Every structure is written in structure tokens, then in C-alpha cells.
Image: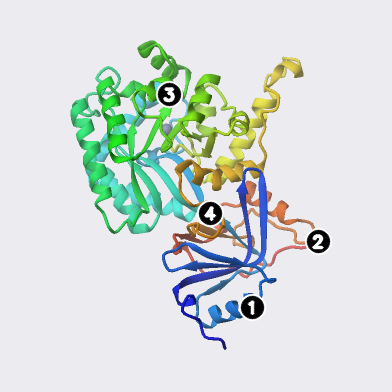
Amino acid sequence: MVQLDKSDAGIKCAVAGTALHTPRCGEIEFLQDALIVIDQPGFIQSILTPTDSHYEQLKNDLKDDDKLLELSNNEYLLPGLIDLHIHAPQWPQMGKALHLPLYDWLHTCTFPLEAKYADVTFAEVVYRSLVDTLLSNGTTTAVYFGTIHLDATKLLADICVELGQRALVGRVSMDNEDQCPDYYRDLSAAKSIEDTREFIEYLRGQSSGAGIVLPAITPRFIPSCSDEALAGHGELAEEYDCHIQTHCSEDNWSHDYGVSRFGKTDTESLLEFGLLTDKTVLAHCNFINPRDMMTIRSAQTAIAHCPLSNFLFSNAVLPVRQLLDKGVKVGLGTDVSGGAHVSIYDSCCQAIVASRALQEGVNANLPPEDRGLADASINFKEAFWMATAGGGEALGFKVGRFSEGYCFDAMVIDAAATDSNLVIWRDMDSLEDVLQKIVYNARRPNVRTVWVQGDIVAGGIPRSNRQVPST
Ligand SMILES: [Zn+2]
């Protein structure tokens, strides 16, 4: 046996098997029989293939050192999924109250629920359940809206640190008396800014998070914030060089509200308030115009595409193909609970379907040539890229792909899992077919093991012995 040399001693673990990822939008890379080596801090140190001279030797050494996970023929290594937009406090509401328009939904269902997070005991139960569920679904990075409550939102961040999920967490800012209820509102713009500052300082002061969990400045959306609060949060973003998240031109009502209040689109207003930066994630953006699109691209701002939520609440479909073609940064979000599915694989499918609906049109009473928007569709490779590498680029994080120097945030998909709806026919399915099938049919039962920064954060349960069918 060859002893591990000094550099090998810095290895945390390694995975050997077939890895699939989309390092560029629309392009799959298949890494067959790859040996992916992760260093102690959790970054990918090297990716070897059987043609590399020391592949076998290193693999054997790692096995002897009990640092190697060897995947079976039914298992595939994929990058962890990235949810660019999710409302943690709305977790108890997921899958209900989906029949209302956005304004009514906020005021009759959502604000009363979010107000309950003044109680940190309630918050702890919900937030633990959510973070655990997301990790079990392979969501290794989540961009969370919290509530207005400092303590509950600090707790959400603490739970992400404890359970090992990479996250951006935002204390929601909303102080506009005209649009926010008395029972759920920051007391003033000054208090709103002060609380956001305290939240940033709290997270920035934590050593245990080690950069895994970061703060995001989170003005809810233009209607809920006063001019003073919007300006103040823009100043905070500059002062702290902090991520920002907000909703932008989501539906007819909120978009029209912004235009009537400021005489300009949400995009233009956010730019003026200093809230459109290369660290901003804008949810939705369904009603942005071509000039807004260029503004967003110039600012290197990212869009969180939330296709199911858009169908349910937004009166429109985001032209995501157009955005990708123009080089705008776009990733996917579940928008729980405006969206009713927690898996980003579901978001991939919904993004594909939404783009096809936009392209083909849906009103059969119109002639085909008038029914849809030409060249609007995306395919599963582009959807998966948005869910992984695209989401990573949106946040400026080195995640979402298998490349040296990237964080090892990954999952094993087990095609032979008990209760699987994913069935691979080995003699009929190419590796491209496998990835497409995973996007459409792999769900929680298939998520075998999940890593964030090289640490196992979910799964690791014994493998099933289920036989995979063959023709
Ligand atoms: Zn949202």
C-alpha cells in the first residue's frame, strides 16, 4: 500500500462514481468513473478520471484510509440544488390558500401567519422542520426571507448553521403604514433600518457559520416599504457590501402600485434606492420591460425565477429564454408558499412547462401563429443549470458544479431507492437520458446523501437492494 503523502493528508473525503453536472447553460458534462477529491475545508481539490496516472493508486489509498465513498451503478453524483427564493415562515402554509390574488393572499393568510413568529418557540419548530426538509430534498443552498422579527430570524440563521445548510437569510423590512397591517409592521423606517443593521452585525459576528450563512438585506417589496426605509436599506447594502433580496414587478397589482407611486418601474426605483447591485436577487420580474431587462443585466443583478408561483399569483409567465439569451443571471426559486412544491426539481419541471406554455400559447381559439411567443422555450439542461451552476453564479458563490476550487455541495441520487418513481433502463437510457429522468422524476426518496462544504448534512442511510429492471 502506498502511504498518503503530505498533501493527501489534507483530504477530507472522496467520491468515486459517475457524476453529472451542467457547468455551462445547456451543456451537460458526464464524469464517468470520476474520483472527486475534497479537501479538509470542503472544497473540490481534484477530479481524476481512470486515464490519470495516479487514479488507481489514490483511490486505493483513500479506500484504505476509509475516506472513499464508492457509488454503485444505480447512483449518480449531482451538484446540490439552489433555491433562490423561499419564505421560511410560510412553510406551514405550503400547499394551501392558493386560490387568492396576491394582495388578498398577503393580507388574509400570509401576514397573520408571519406575525406569529414573534414567538420564537413557534419559529424554532417551523424553521427546523423546513431546513431539515430542504436538505433531505437536496437543496444545499437556500435564499430565505424571514419575518420582521429579529429573534426569530436570527434563530433561522442559527438553525441553518447548526444543520449545515448554505443560506442567505434576511430579516424582512416593511414599515409602510398604508400597505402593512398594524399587527405586522416595523414601527418606523428608522427602527426598520436599525433592526436590519443589528441582524447583519449578528450574522457577520458569528464564527460558527464560517461563511456558510450570510445576511441578506430584505425590503419585502416596494409597496411594503417607505421611501426612507428603501433609501436606508440601500445605504446599508453599500456600507456592508451585503447581499440584497426583494420582489420586483411580480404581478399586475404590485407592478402598477410601484409605477403609480414613483412614476417608474420597480427596477428603476430599486436602482435609484441603491438596491440593484451584483449581489441582489430579484424574485419574479414578470412585468419588467426591455429597458428594465438591460438595467438588470448591466447591474449584474440576478433574477429568481419562480414558475409555479408565477402561474398561481403573477398573471404572467417570465420570458426566461429571452433573459438567458441576453446574459441576465437567472436561477430558480420555489417561492414557498406562493409556490406549493419544495423540491427544486419540481421548479425545473415547472420552468420547462411555463416556457413551453409561453411559446405555444394556451388559448386554442386563437390561430397557432397568434397563440404564443416564438423561441420562448427552455430544455431540461437549461433548467438544471439554473437550479445549480446558474443559481451559484446568481449569488456569486462557487457552488453548483464540479470544478476544482468549488465548494463540494452535492447529492447522490439513487435510482434504485425504495419507493422511487425514477426508473433507469440501463440498456435503453443514455447518461443524458438519466439526467433528464432525474430532473423529471427524482425526488426525496432518491436523495441518498447530501453534502454542504464537504460535510454530510442529510442522508447517508443504508442503500436499498432493489433490483433495477432491464429489458
Ligand atoms: Zn416571494
Q: Can residue 119 be seen in this view?
A: no
Front position among marks 2 and 1 = 1
- First in residue order: circle 3 vs circle 4: 3
Label 1: state its secondary structure: helix
Q: How crowded is mark 3: few (under 14 residues within 10 Å), some or many (20 or more)?
A: many
As drawn, the label of residue 471 is 2
Circle 1/circle 4 CB separation < 8 Å: no
The residue at which mark 1 appears reads as 56
- Mark 2–mark 3 Cα distance, whole angstroms, equals 49 Å
Name the residue type under label 1.
Glu
Relative placement, left or right, of 50 versus 122 is right
For the N terminus, the image quarter is bottom right
Q: Under tag 3, what secondary structure? A: helix
The amino acid on which the numbered mark 4 sits, given as a three-letter code, is Arg
Mark 2 neighbour class, 10 Å CA radius: few under 14, some 14 to 19, many 20 or more: few
Circle 3: residue type: Leu
